[in-house]
Image (cartoon, rainbow, N blue to C red):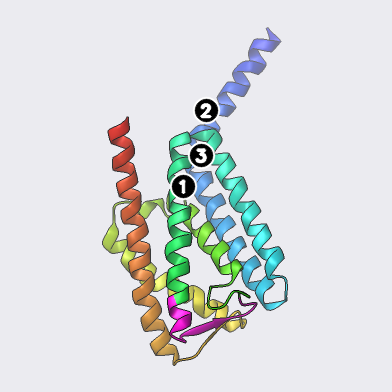
Amino acid sequence: MQLNKNRKILLDLYHHLIENFNKMNFLLNTAAFYLAWFVCLYGATHNYSFLAMLFVTALLGVHLLFIKRRSEQLFQQDLCLVMFSVIVGSVMETTLMLNHLQAYASPNPIGALPPFWIIALYAFFGTTINHSMKWLKGRIKLAFIVGSVGGPLCYLGGAKINAVTFSVSLVEAYSVLALTWGFFVASIFWLQVKLDLSQARID
């Protein structure tokens, strides 16, 4: 009798957690991203960039492991978005650096490539698309606006603690970053829609 009662309590708790998963997932993913952002910027400016990269990589691994246990399809989609974010973000950052727009603290020893801590941040940003930024799903124009505002603000925050320095005026840097990040965020949400459609056809 007591066993059945305990089992019922556990089942009720499980269903309660599932019902509140989206809300908890939003909060956890948001907190994890800003934690990753802070750790990377702090590490870059205090000669701990390698440890910061390892921390964010571990955080990324925990996220993917958790998602894989919940849903294989969501895991595969998250993985694609992370890879897209890393590849496109690295090309974007390299282009900006080659055009002498900005320079980072703790730079990558391999030429003009972006620092490893920046690449790690792009990887973790890829996890936000299906979770803390899920409300932008299918809203490509709004995604462009959010990217064009939020992206440059992150750089300005980094500039305040000398994690990034600009070689041009603040207005010019903001204008270029707004356009670049607008297209970047819009493109990753476009990809997310395509991945949804592709998985729907398979199902």
* Residue found 67% across the figure and 72% down from its top: 42
Please report the bounds of the magenta region as a residue range. 95-107
Viewer-proximal residue, 150 or 10?
150
**Where is residue 15 shown, x and y percent of the image?**
52, 27
* Residue found 53% across the figure and 45% down from its top: 24
Please, what secondary structure does the residue beneath circle 2 have? Answer: helix
**Where is residue 121 shown, x and y percent of the image?**
55, 63
Residue carrying label 2: 15
Q: N-terminal of the two: label 3 or label 1?
A: 3
C-alpha distance separating marks 1 and 2: 24 Å
Q: Nearer the viewer, mark 3 or mark 1?
A: 1
C-alpha distance separating marks 2 and 3: 10 Å
- For the C terminus, give its image quadrant: top left
Q: N-terminal of the two: label 2 or label 3?
A: 2
- Dot 1, crowdedness within 10 Å: few (<14), some or many (≥20)? many
Residue 73's quadrant in the figure? top left
Question: Which amino acid, by three-letter code, is at mark 3?
Answer: Phe
- Figure check: 74 above or below 170: above
Question: Which amino acid, by three-letter code, is at mark 1?
Answer: Asp
* Residue found 63% across the figure and 75% down from its top: 109
Please, what secondary structure does the residue beneath circle 3 have? Answer: helix
Q: Are marks 2 and 3 in contact (CB under 8 Å)?
A: no
Q: Residue furthest front?
A: 110
**Where is residue 29 shown, x and y percent of the image?**
54, 52
- Figure check: 77 above or below 128: above
Please, what secondary structure does the residue beneath circle 1 have? Answer: helix
C-alpha distance separating marks 3 and 1: 17 Å
Residue 99 lies within the magenta run: yes
- For the N terminus, give its image quadrant: top right
Residue carrying label 1: 78
